[in-house]
């Protein structure tokens, strides 16, 4: 069953990344079109217009990127349903098989936390794109050069670490799925009194050493936090139950009980 669950999370995260990619392409086109209308076809853009365009850029980001983010976060109900479907077949206390009022409140809080990650990136887009438009206006650069910069800033230009900004959006879309799953899983596991966790998932060419060493093994919480103290490439800050192997990690912690036949949980 963990295999099916991991495959489900993989498909969901890939779908969300695709949604974000298409949204950023639309956002790019709408911002360029908005600037074109504001300049009235002029080769150079006035500073006054550049300042006023910030409101339009903000509106476009909210109507495209954040609207997509909202749809994506609402999709996390599927993660909850998949979790309950799988664990309902195991030797779990009844309270672990359904959602309580507190569970629903927790899910809402986790969704809000996930959405804030998308909002942070949206604010970064707003600041950087608006600044880019203003700086181009001040420098007297052509409309063509400004559009080139904007298109690069959203979908093609690399930042100081050599990564396109669109990659950050895709990474957030992927990691939000896995982190929501991790947060909800550890929450429900602790509420049911489960204290052991099996590290599940498959190894691929890019699997980190941490994951390669521990996948398939079962630990208690103290042991998990102990093995988390090391450093490895790609490790991200946070709780080991949530961020696991690091950025874009697709492994999951599966709550288990010492009385279960753990070998069946593959």
Image (cartoon, rainbow, N blue to C red):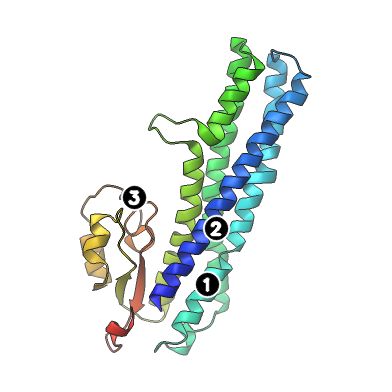
How would you rate the neighbour count of disc 3 (Cα within 10 Å): few for under 14, some for 14-19, many for 20 or more?
some
- Label 3, on which residue? 236
Where residue 219 sits, quadrant-wise, is: bottom left
Check disc 1 and report its element: helix, strand or loop: helix
Check disc 3 and report its element: helix, strand or loop: loop
Identified at 34% across, 50% down, the residue is 237
The correct choice, above or below, for 206 with respect to 212 in the image is above
Q: CA distance from mark 3 to mark 1?
A: 24 Å
Q: CA distance from mark 3 to mark 2?
A: 23 Å
Tell me which numbered mark, 3 or 1, is placed earlier along the sequence. 1
How would you rate the neighbour count of disc 1 (Cα within 10 Å): few for under 14, some for 14-19, many for 20 or more?
some
The correct choice, above or below, for 84 with respect to 61 in the image is below
| Quarter of the C terminus within the rendering | bottom left
- Image location of residue 67, percent across then percent down: 66, 50
Identified at 52% across, 62% down, the residue is 12
- Image location of residue 261, percent across then percent down: 29, 87
Q: Is residue 221 left or right of residue 77?
A: left
Tell me which numbered mark, 3 or 2, is placed earlier along the sequence. 2
Q: CA distance from mark 2 to mark 1?
A: 17 Å
- Image location of residue 212, percent across then percent down: 24, 61
Q: Which residue in the rendered view is the most extreme toward the front?
A: 205
How would you rate the neighbour count of disc 2 (Cα within 10 Å): few for under 14, some for 14-19, many for 20 or more?
some
Residue 155 appears in the figure: yes
- Label 1, on which residue? 80
Label of residue 15 in the image: 2
Q: How many marks?
A: 3
- Image location of residue 1, percent across then percent down: 41, 79
The correct choice, above or below, for 217 with respect to 155 in the image is below
Check disc 2 and report its element: helix, strand or loop: helix
């Amino acid at each position: 069953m963990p295999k099916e669950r991991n495959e489900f999370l993989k498909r969901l995260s890939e779908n969300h990344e695709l949604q974000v990619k298409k949204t950023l392409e639309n956002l790019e086109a709408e911002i360029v079109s908005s600037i074109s209308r504001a300049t009235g076809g002029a080769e150079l853009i006035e500073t006054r217009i550049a300042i006023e365009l910030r409101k339009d850029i903000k509106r476009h980001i909210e109507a495209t990127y954040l609207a997509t983010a909202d749809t994506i976060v609402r999709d996390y109900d599927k993660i909850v349903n998949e979790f309950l479907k799988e664990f309902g077949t195991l030797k779990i206390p009844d309270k672990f098989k359904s959602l309580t009022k507190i569970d629903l409140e927790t899910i809402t809080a986790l969704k809000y936390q996930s959405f804030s990650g998308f909002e942070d990136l949206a604010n970064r887009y707003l600041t950087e794109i608006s600044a880019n438009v203003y700086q181009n206006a001040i420098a007297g650069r052509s409309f063509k050069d400004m559009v080139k910069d904007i298109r690069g800033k959203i979908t093609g230009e690399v930042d100081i670490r050599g990564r396109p900004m669109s990659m950050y959006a895709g990474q957030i879309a992927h990691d939000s799925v896995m982190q929501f799953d991790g947060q909800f899983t550890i929450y429900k596991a602790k509420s049911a009194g489960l204290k052991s966790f099996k590290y599940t998932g498959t190894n691929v060419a890019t699997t980190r050493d941490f994951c390669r060493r521990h996948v398939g093994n079962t630990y208690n919480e103290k042991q998990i936090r102990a093995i988390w103290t090391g450093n490895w490439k790609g490790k991200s800050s946070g709780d080991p139950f949530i961020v696991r192997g690091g950025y874009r990690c697709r492994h999951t912690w599966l709550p288990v009980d010492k009385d279960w036949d753990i070998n069946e949980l593959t």
